[in-house]
Amino acid sequence: MSNTPSNPAAQGPNVPRIEAGDRESPFLGVFRALGSILGPLIGLILVITVFGIWQPDSFLSKEAFRSVFEHNYHYVIAAIGATFVIITAGIDLSVGSTMGLASVCCAMAAAGTHFPEFEWQQGLVIGGGVALLTGLCFGGWTLQRGWTRWRACFWAVVSATAAAGTGLAGWRLLSGVSIAPMPVLIALLVGVASGALVGLLNGTLITTLSLPPFIVTLATLGAVRGLTLYITGGIPIPNLPESISKLHYGPWSPWLLGISPNLWITIAVVVVSIPLLHFTVFGRYAFAIGSNERTARLCGVHVERWKTLCYVIAGSTAGLAGAIMTASLGGRPTNFEGLELIAIAAVVIGGTSLFGGEGTVAGSILGVLMLGFLNTGCTMASLSSYVQPIFIGATIVIAAAIDRFRHLGR
């Protein structure tokens, strides 16, 4: 058994630590980022060129470009969150389901909702689910800190019991309560919060139980979609207020410059996410975890904390993307099925390595635009809608293969 101390601070003076003052020059980071987006930029120009020559009158029109931007902004937001996760060498397969849940929650908040009357069977299911997740996560967390199995099991049962009681009591208080329609801003925040909770669940299960992100997010993909269908009964949320549809369809105030509020929200997310990933200590830690998690841990990085935060960001962006799309798609529980494939494809096409440690927000945006122009071009060229998934799948394989070849060549 190794005698190496678990505390990084106890490793001795020879173990380097990642500090805020150790950051490399911002200009060097900018040059590296520009070099990494060269590939997706060339791919985007190639797609525009090919379809521009094929269908010049329709594809190169102002309306076609405007359509691409106004019908893909939710992909941009979702892809930005997925970028944070994939940079840490993780994956989030629950993006589409999270967006569906957030859209439904936003619609319910905007239209008003009524919680069903309390039933013991339903309450026990809710309490049991909360207890199971709490017990597993707390047990894994205590075992990682060196607790004995019996002690960890005992406190896991205690925490699970307390969580079950809290969940049951909370559902009992909500049962039969009617909630009046909320303002649009509050409804959007409800959608973001629901997505953040899914991200927190993903990150907590991955870090406390040391489970592969693929397994955890595959499980939540199905579980969250099932939850969305259950709370809606499989039918769309009716009576949405007109104010929420204005986020996409208008009419808009003159000071918005003719751009939809949803597109402005997307621009704000881009403006915030680029410096957050590339010019903060948090971003530095995310890249360090993806490059070599063990080395990052030895350097004093709290891997579990920052990795969980990346999944919370991914869940929050997915929640925001789903919430703002309520304006155009409504609160249908079946919305966004399979969207995780497009989000991951955009990130990989944009130059983010599936092996972690490399990637840019700008590259992911270029990946979304490339897929958007590809879809528009296929539609204008009267190609079958079944062809696009073939292109997306092939592009993922090609991008992953190129990334693998780059790593093998080093």
Image (tube, grey):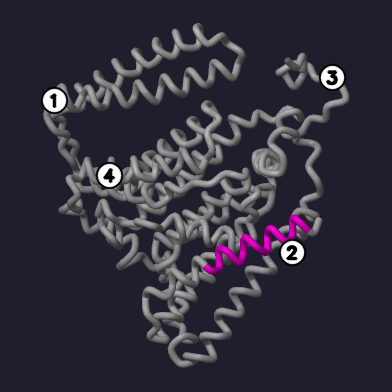
Residue 97 in percent (x, y) is at: 36, 48
Q: Distance between the residues labelled 1 and 2?
A: 59 Å
Name the element at disc 4. helix
| Rendered-image quadrant of the N terminus | top right
Q: Marks 1 and 3: in contact by CB < 8 Å? A: no
N-term mark: 2 or 3: 3
Residue 361 in percent (x, y) is at: 60, 56
- Which disc is residue 299 wearing? none
Q: How far apart are marks 4 and 3 (CA)?
A: 50 Å
Q: What residue type is labelled 4?
A: Thr
Residue beneath the point at 87% across and 22% down: 13
Residue extent of the magenta highlight: 394-408
Residue beneath the point at 50% across and 91% down: 54
Q: How far apart are marks 2 and 3 (CA)?
A: 37 Å
Left or right, 279 with reference to 66: right
Q: Is the magenta stretch mostly helix, strand or loop?
A: helix
Q: Distance between the residues labelled 2 and 4?
A: 41 Å
Residue beneath the point at 46% across and 11% down: 153
Q: Mark 3 points at which residue?
A: 12
Q: What residue type is labelled 3?
A: Gly
Query: Closer to us: mark 2 or mark 3?
Result: 3
| Rendered-image quadrant of the C terminus | bottom right
Is the residue marked by circle 3 packed among few (<14), some (14-19), or many (20+) residues within 10 Å?
Answer: few
Q: Mark 2 points at which residue?
A: 35
Q: Name the residue under label 4.
A: 228
Q: Name the residue under label 1.
A: 119
Name the element at disc 1. loop
Find the residue positioned furthest to the right: 14
N-term mark: 2 or 4: 2
